[in-house]
Amino acid sequence: MPSRSDVVDQHTFRARLVLDAAQRAASYVAESRERDVFPTEQALRDLAGFPRELADEPVPASEVLAMLDELGSPATVVSTGGRYFGFVNGGADPAASAAAVLVSAWDQNVALPVMSPVAALLDELAGRWSCQLLGLPGTAIAAFCSGASIANLTCILAARDALLRRAGWSVERRGLAGAPRLRVVASAEIHASVEKALRAAGFGTDDVTSAPTDDCGRVLVEEFPSVDDRTLVLLQAGNVNTGHSDPFRQIIPSVHDNGGWVHVDGAFGLWAAASDTQRHRVDGVDLADSWATDGHKWLNAPYDSGIAICRDPADLRRAMAFDAAYFATDAERAAAHLGLQMSQRARGAEIWAILASHGRRGIAELVDRLCAHAKRMADLLDAAGARILIPTALNQVLVQFDNDQTTDAVIAAVQADRTCWAGGTRWHGHRAMRISICDSATTSTDIETAAHAILRCWRTCKDA
């Protein structure tokens, strides 16, 4: 058994190491504005310095930390520096980043309130505040999970079990073999993560009917398939390419009239509801039965910040709760009974820190600012002759340069230039650069700098 002095020494050493890590992290943050958005070739070559074989003998933790920083930090993609526009990654809110340091030191398990009263409280507050910001029903309950993919899966499982329960079938007791067949109606623009969630929940492609969409990726009301009381409808708040959302108010009431369930994948677009000026883009989204969103996108929380929300808490609990004598609790809200995981970190604390520091007005301003940045980026590129494929909505810009071949060349040139970073996609037969503006650190100057870099690369490609 370790002596008292050994335990004290371990805690002292841990404190020193955490301080060292915090100082290194602070230096990284301070220097991020000056770093290339994508690692240099030298930084990538230096990754060879990480040993490929596990050492036989211990290595001092301080040396491991130094290696992680000195070899790892230069090889990061600076997605928190204001000019990373690839994917919908989000940046790092200052309050959330600081809270993450403290929460890591706490090392709390939020599975049951008795495991961490403070983590349970912050989890409850962050979930309730998120629902309020999004304008969702007062009955709704939010559960934190690893990301929007798992949030979608969590809600789809709750929907599946609820629809089968209404049909007289208990999944908990009888499983899925022999169960009444359910049907899924999903937007033709359904995100790949939702397709994965459907497979994990037992739905195959033959179970899915695709709902046609318009040029902006929105479901066409007049061509929406018929539904019944064994239908799960999947809609989108924020198409990953265009930013546009489905016409919720025109679709959801008729689905409910026929006994169906509506789930909304709102990984980033759902946060439009937090802004008075953008809320119209998701009009009627509050009528759904469940929603999935992500804190690490628009809120700029650290990763591992998905949010699964159900209108009726009982539907979520019935799908996720379990029975174990040593895990019994009378708590109305226990994270382990609201999601797929049992042991889990205090995810809600970081989102609580963001919401507590920004308040309603601050979150609305963040949404508005990033939308304005996207509009400005589109205007600058459009004025220079590039083709904006879809009217800009929320924080997404789709742009083409002359033709498919030139567009791909410009994307490659921009990525090699490293002033900013944007990726490519295909939209209705056209190759396009997809610019996702999600970092709270992005400034108007960043937009001007990035637009000029993109246009410079375009000119170079045209002259080649």
Image (tube, rainbow, N blue to C red):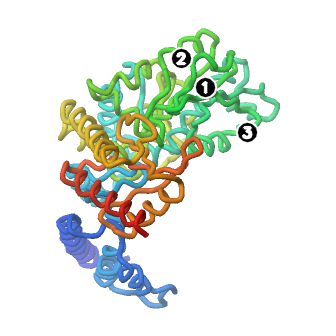
Task: Locate the C terminus and report the quarter of the image it occupies.
Answer: bottom left
Measuring from the top left, give residue 324's x and y in whole percent. 56, 42
Q: Is residue 112 above or below residue 226?
A: below
Q: Is residue 223 above or below residue 53?
A: above
Q: Residues within 10 Å of mark 2 (few under 14, many from 20)?
A: many
Asked if residue 36 lies left or right of residue 156, the reply is left
Residue at figure coordinates x 65%, y 27% from the top left: 185
The quadrant where residue 155 appears: top right
Q: The disc labelled 2 sits on which kind of residue?
A: Ile
Query: Which label belongs to residue 233?
Result: 1
Q: Looking at this view, is 120 or 360 the one in front?
A: 360
> Residue reaching furthest bottom?
57
Task: Locate the N terminus and report the quarter of the image it occupies.
Answer: bottom left
Q: The disc labelled 3 sits on which kind of residue?
A: Thr
**Element at label 2:** helix
- Residue under label 3, please give it: 205
Residue at figure coordinates x 39%, y 43% from the top left: 397
Residue at figure coordinates x 62%, y 24% from the top left: 162
**Element at label 3:** helix
Decide if residue 348 is in sight here: no
Q: Looking at this view, is 422 or 191 the one in front?
A: 422
Q: The disc labelled 1 sits on which kind of residue?
A: Val
Q: Earlier in the sequence, mark 1 or mark 2?
A: 1
Q: Earlier in the sequence, mark 2 or mark 3?
A: 3
Q: Residues within 10 Å of mark 1 (few under 14, many from 20)?
A: many
Measuring from the top left, give residue 353's x and y in whole percent. 23, 44
Asked if residue 142 lies left or right of residue 195, the reply is left
- Residue under label 2, please give it: 252
Q: Looking at this view, is 430 or 25 the one in front?
A: 430
Measuring from the top left, give residue 222's x and y in whole percent. 60, 16
Q: CA distance from mark 1 to mark 3?
A: 14 Å
